[in-house]
Amino acid sequence: MTFNFRLSTFLAKIVSYVFHPLFIPTYIFLYLLKQFPYEFAGITEWQLKMKLFSVFWMTAFFPAFAVFLLWRLKFSDSIFLRTQKERIIPYFICMFFYWWMYYLSRTFTDQPSVLKFFYFGIFTATVIGVFINNYIKISLHGIAMGGALAAIILFAFIYHSTTGYSITGILLLTGLVCTARFLVSDHTTLEVYSGVILGIVCQLIGLWFV
């Protein structure tokens, strides 16, 4: 029994790391690249790699490095941001980079236009998330997976594409990640489910606004 618990906890940690909220924008970009390659027509392979790298650099590396600096400068007790207070500055850091990605995407003509509402959606999620953070420690994983779930479903409608496998896959992944957070974090069901709902709603807001 103890072994099974340790194994499930270990696997839950792996899932939480692999599907960390900071990686989700990069995964979404990769999904668009593989699922709708015609949206990147006329771009060389090198340019595609640089675009992918820039998404990772702006939405994952810089925010993660900022969190690392906050920890080293003693502004937070750990890089895992276990308390609501520790999450405030990282929220604003992500807010800045997500807004910047949305701002840049408005002028891009060599990549999918759907990225505009996706970036605006995740920016909006951080804005609302930092406000909700004053009351409950809303799940960042929940927000990210809810946003990814809504984005992939909306992509299917926008492109009139039969991406049933993709939607099924993201549904299963969302459930898997939420289950993992229940196992290895101190989140309540309210915090995880409200995170998923917020992620979904903000993508709808992004689509409506953009």
Image: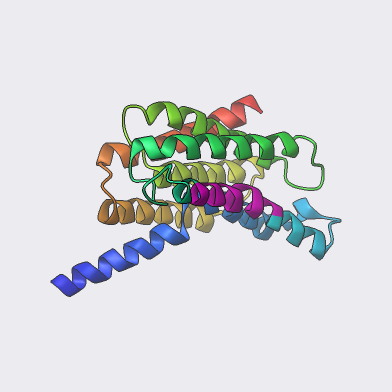
Total marks shown come to: 0
On screen, residue 80 above or below 204? below
Residue under the image location 30 percent in, 54 percent down: 179
Task: Classify residue 100 as left or right of residue 38.
Answer: left
Image location (x, y in percent) of residue 30: 63, 57
Instruction: Please tell me which residue lies in front, 94 or 145.
Output: 94
> In the orientation shown, which residue stands out farthest toward the bottom?
3
Image location (x, y in percent) of residue 53: 69, 57
Instruction: Please tell me which residue lies in front, 133 or 119.
Output: 133
Magenta stretch encompasses residue 55? yes
On screen, residue 32 above or below 142? below
Residue under the image location 42 percent in, 56 percent down: 173
- Specify the principal SS of the magenta part: helix
On screen, residue 208 above or below 24? above
Give the magenta range: 54-69
Instruction: Please tell me which residue lies in front, 52 or 163.
Output: 52
Quadrant for the N terminus in the image: bottom left
Residue 75 sits in quarter: top left
Task: Classify residue 129 as left or right of residue 6.
Answer: right
Image location (x, y in percent) of residue 106: 75, 34
On screen, residue 10 above or below 108? below
Image location (x, y in percent) of residue 182: 27, 51
Quadrant for the C terminus in the image: top right
Q: How is the image coloured?
A: rainbow
> In the orientation shown, which residue stands out farthest toward the front?
73
